[in-house]
Image (cartoon, rainbow, N blue to C red):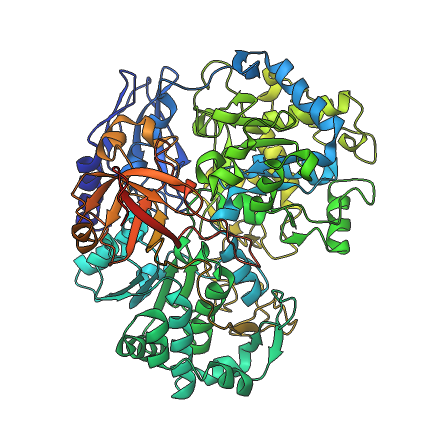
Amino acid sequence: MDAQRRTFLKSSAMAAAGSLVASGTSLSLPVLAAEDHLPDGDDVRWNKAPCRFCGTGCHVQVGVESGRVVAIAGDKAADVNKGLLCVKGYHVGGILYGEDRLTQPLLRKEGRLTEVSWDEAITIIAERIMKAPERFAFYGSGQWTIPEGYAAQKLMKGGLGNNQIDPNARLCMASAVTGFLATYGVDEPAGCYQDLDECDVVITWGNNPAEMHPVLFSRVTDRRSRGEKVMLIDIGTRRTRTTDAADEYLEMKPHGDVAISLGVMHLLVANENYDKAFVEKHCNFRGAEADAPTLHGEAISEADFRKRIAKYTPEHVEALSGVPAAKIRMLADLFADREIRITSLWCMGMNQHTMGTAINSLVHGVHLLSGHFGRPGDAPTSLTGQPSACGTVREVGTLAHALPGGRLVENAEHRQQCEELWNLRPGSINATPGYHTVKMFEQFTKPTAEGGDIDTMFVQVTNPGQTLPNLNALFNDKQGLEDKFLIVSDVYPTATTRLADLILPAAMWVEKNGMFGNSERRTQQWFKMVDPPGQARDDCWMTIAIAHKLLELGHEGMKDKDGEFIFAVRDDAGDELPVWEYEHYYDTNVDKHLFEEYRGFTTMKHKNLAPYDEYVKARGLRWPVVEQPDGSWRETRYRFSGFDDPFVAEGEEFDFYHSSSKDGRAQIWFHEYQPPPEMPDGEYPFWLCTGRVLEHWHSGTMTRRVAPLSRAMPTAYVEMNPEDARAANIRQGETVVIESRRGTAELPVWIDGRGRPPRGTVFVPFFDETKLINNCTLEAHDPFSKQPDYKKCAVRVMKQSGART
């Protein structure tokens, strides 16, 4: 690994945060780069774990002494990061030691939180579920470990026959899922991170990997530092640190990405520059149905595709997107060149979009139409923001409409398969999908008398009181509803625990066993290394304990068809272990038991996983993982490509074996451009876009407890264009009010900071629970994925005196 790359990442981490001192404690954790010598001696024990933060899946070495994490180092043996970490990764150990850790179950009685025992807490939950199982909802996360998500899935869909379970990945990855499904018939990328080492061109579609996925982005900057030519094209609505490294910057209007992708495909077809051989052999054309559109769409001919796309000339695309026609032609010329290799990257900019499924499908279509697919370096790749949004949400299927391994609750055959694998009575699984996240919270915050049919909700590993859109309607309206009961499992007080009726203290990261699945289909495992504080306990244990309490209360769904507890774990002698009792939870490896059970679900969509013990030995394996004649297990880097994918038919160069058209072909979609759901006007003249920052992860619950990270970025802010600020007589650092039709937030102004928005737009990060920008965002969402659009709504900016701008 190039020394310049190591030095760059290490020095940027040091500059942003210095050596780690966990907030409120005297603990100091040194920042160690991969090449640093790890301290020897019997007192410090080192073990591997994936980083707790984003979906990149970097591995760290965790140093433990006297029952505490005392040091973190990049893991040189990890293929993902080769020993490198970003500023958050270098300081991940500090997230365990904030001074306000939750350590005891707390029940709200007469408006005050009172300590209760775990047995009382579990009994309260079970009794509420027993009273009305159909009115209970489980809201989880892409931060669930694979076993945690699988246990929640089995409790809800298998045990309770209740599909009211959804994750916060609905807010960040759902449109990527529907885009993959609509195109290939199966979810998750075909390529891998190696594409960044092989490509000639990288296109970032509305994302900022220089800050959000810096270890991945460093692969590109590292190649440049060695003298390799890698062209970077940044397509965005504001200039970022990624733009600073770009060869070309295409500044687009909100929703402009849809028009840009259509314009590129128009030119490829009009100039006969598309890859005719690839398209004729491996692709179909698809369009959205006029009535009740679905992810299958309707088959259209190439001639019809040409006719529909004909109007998206460079000049028309310029009018829609704001990107000069010459830049559209430049993009199309690059895609027309089969001698180069092009990797597209995207994240929330394309997913948090009312045309999220459409833009995801269209970018896949650009790659398919041009033939820039299936070779190392030629790939359309979605990046994820959460450590197991892929492994737990998408693969385990913890979505309201899904079942494990790519199955759907509406499909009778899929329900039957799951009932058989879970050894349940036929008909145990409900055929009606549950509510997606926005609808789930609408029902929870609506009074029962007005039709709000969710009255008990269990939230694990996420913070919807800060991250939901339109918080006043979807979360804050819960306040004062006596018939609504909110249970929250978390590690620190949050914006969500503020309205919780029952708070459960959770173990975190290396305080428990775990498994994650990252953005490149890599499944990763780690062991518990330290004990959680006080009475904090594993989320997976909570789920199993609730299930067993329901069994004790007589809920028949907690038994399989042979009368056994659905989470029964037996020892080698065949005796059942009482894993629902926390003092016995670690008498065995519950993670291993649940994972081995889950493995049986993974083969239908060729998401095959290796045995648990193979992941213990590895720094993750990319599925499908298949056993070789010599008994070893082989991972897959490139799906659908005959040179690497073991499931491609013999002799085929490509095989889209889960094709929705059942013919081994991928789908090239046409979607008509549509304007954003809310546009600036005279009353609300600015576009608002929300996002993240380098130092903090999502809602900041963990990173804001790490003192150096908090000092480096202490508060949220609003980025304004200097001319807009000057016209409104707003000065650097001045506090302003951002107001939409839904709510307000007060923020200091940052002019000419890291991000530089064009006139008429503002940007606000959402990590700061004292400045809740999601009071302003709107819940309008994609019709297919149901993912809300956090990137564009109309606001006004007011000086605190009340003068509007």
Residue 460 image point, x, y percent? 54, 32
Residue 37 image point, x, y percent? 23, 31
- For image coordinates 60% across by 21% down, the residue present is 585
Side (left or right) of 803 relative to 546:
left
Residue closest to the eye, 176 or 797: 797
Up/down of 458 relative to 272, above or below: above
Q: In this orientation, does residue 182 appear?
A: yes
Side (left or right) of 346 relative to 624:
left
- For image coordinates 23% across by 30% down, the residue present is 711
The answer to which quarter of the image holds residue 372 is bottom left
Side (left or right) of 635 relative to 608:
left
Up/down of 620 relative to 334, above or below: above
Residue closest to the eye, 738 or 801: 801
Side (left or right) of 449 relative to 514:
right
Q: In this orientation, does residue 576 appear?
A: no
Up/down of 96 relative to 109, above or below: below
Residue 574 image point, x, y percent? 74, 25
- For image coordinates 46% across by 27% down, the residue present is 508
Residue closest to the eye, 761 or 801: 801
- How many marks can you see? 0
Residue 286 image point, x, y percent? 57, 75
The answer to which quarter of the image holds residue 488 is top right
